[in-house]
Amino acid sequence: MNIIFMGTPDFSIPSLKALVESRHNVVAVVTAPDKERGRGRKVTFTPVKEFALEHNIPVLQPEKLKGNEEFVEQLKRYNTDLYVVVAFRILPKEVFTIPPKGSFNLHASLLPKYRGAAPIQWALINGETETGLTTFKLAEKVDTGNIYLQRKLEIKPEDNFETLHDRLSELGAQVVMETVELIDSCDYVLQEQDDSLASPAPKITKEIAKIDWHKPAVEVHNLIRGLSPVPGAYFFLHDKMTKIYKSEVVERDDLKPSEIYHTKKELVIGCGKNALSVLELKQEGRKRMGVEEFLRGFRFE
C-alpha cells in the first residue's frame, strides 16, 4: 500500500521506521512546521522531519489543517491508500477521509481510558499498574473512533514518564504494523468504544505540575513519576522553583505537610499522609543532581 505518515515527536519514530522498512511504501510524511529555539533562535526540525530527510521521503508541513484547500490538494496528488497517524495534531474530516482505506491513529492508552493529549502522564499520575496502546479509525470527535487493535503493557513501580514513553513507543511500532496488515488484508472487525467508560487525559499545565504537600505521599510520588523528566513536578524552596525527578515514599507521620527534615544525605518532606524522600532534584539556577550533592551546596534557612 501507499501510505502517508503523520507525526511529530520522538514517540513517532519507531512506527515510521517500521513502515519504511516494510513492504509498504511511505510516499510522504506530514509533520509540524519548523521552529526557532534557544537563545540563538536556531531553526530546528521535528524528529519526524529529520528521519524523513535522511530517508529521502517528501515532507509536508502545513501551518493549519482545517480549511486548508492547498494542503488537501497536495495530499490528493499522492494517490495514497492509507494515512497512519502517530502523535500528531487533530485531523479535520476533509483530511482523514481522503484515502480509500481511511486513516488510523495510534494512541498511548487502552481507549476509551485516558482520551486526550497526555495519556502516558495521567496513567502514572493516577498510579495505574497497567496501560497499553490502541489503534483506532479516525472519527470527527477526538479519540472516539472504532478500535482495530489493543495491546496491554505493565507499568513497573520504577517507571517514570521517560521510561514508559520509550517502551510504549517501541511496542507501538509493532501495533502499527499489525494494524496496517489487517487493513491491507481487510481481515478485521472494528470494535466500538464504550463512552461510559471514558476518562480524560488533558494537557499538563503548570498548575497540575505544582506539588500539593497536603496530598498523601504516594500521590505526590506518582505526580513526580508522571512528569519526570519533563516538564517536572515542582515546589518552591526558598522562593526558587525546585523540580523533583526521583523520590520514594517514607512511612512517617511526624512531619506536617511541606515540613522539611534534612541531614547531610537525606531530604524528607511531610505530606498529608506519610512523607516523601527526595532522591533527585534541580533548583532554578543549578544543575540537576542527586540529593546528597544538592545538600552539600545548600544552606537551609
Image (cartoon, rainbow, N blue to C red):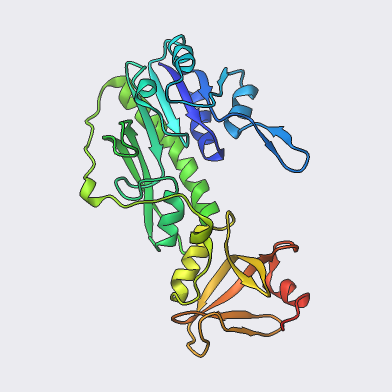
Query: Residue 23, image x and y in percent?
Result: 45, 19
Q: Toward the viewer: 187 or 101?
A: 101
Is residue 11 left or right of 144 when viewed as pictured?
right
Q: Toward the viewer: 135 or 42?
A: 42
* 158, above or below 177, in the image: below
Query: Residue 82, image x and y in percent?
Result: 38, 20
Is residue 17 left or right of 124 when viewed as pictured?
right
Is residue 230 left or right of 72 when viewed as pictured?
right
Q: Quadrant of residue 247?
A: bottom right
The number of numbered discs placed on residues in the rendered structure image is 0
Is residue 154 left or right of 243 when viewed as pictured?
left
Query: Residue 126, image x and y in percent?
Result: 39, 62
Q: Quadrant of residue 219?
A: bottom left
Q: Toward the viewer: 278 or 215?
A: 215
* 105, above or below 269, in the image: above
At 60% from the left and 73% from the top, the residue drawn is: 278
At 46% from the left and 34% from the top, the residue drawn is: 89
Q: Quadrant of the N terminus?
A: top left
Inspect this view and state whether residue 276 appears: yes
Inspect this view and state whether residue 158 appears: no
At 51% from the left and 86% from the top, the residue drawn is: 256
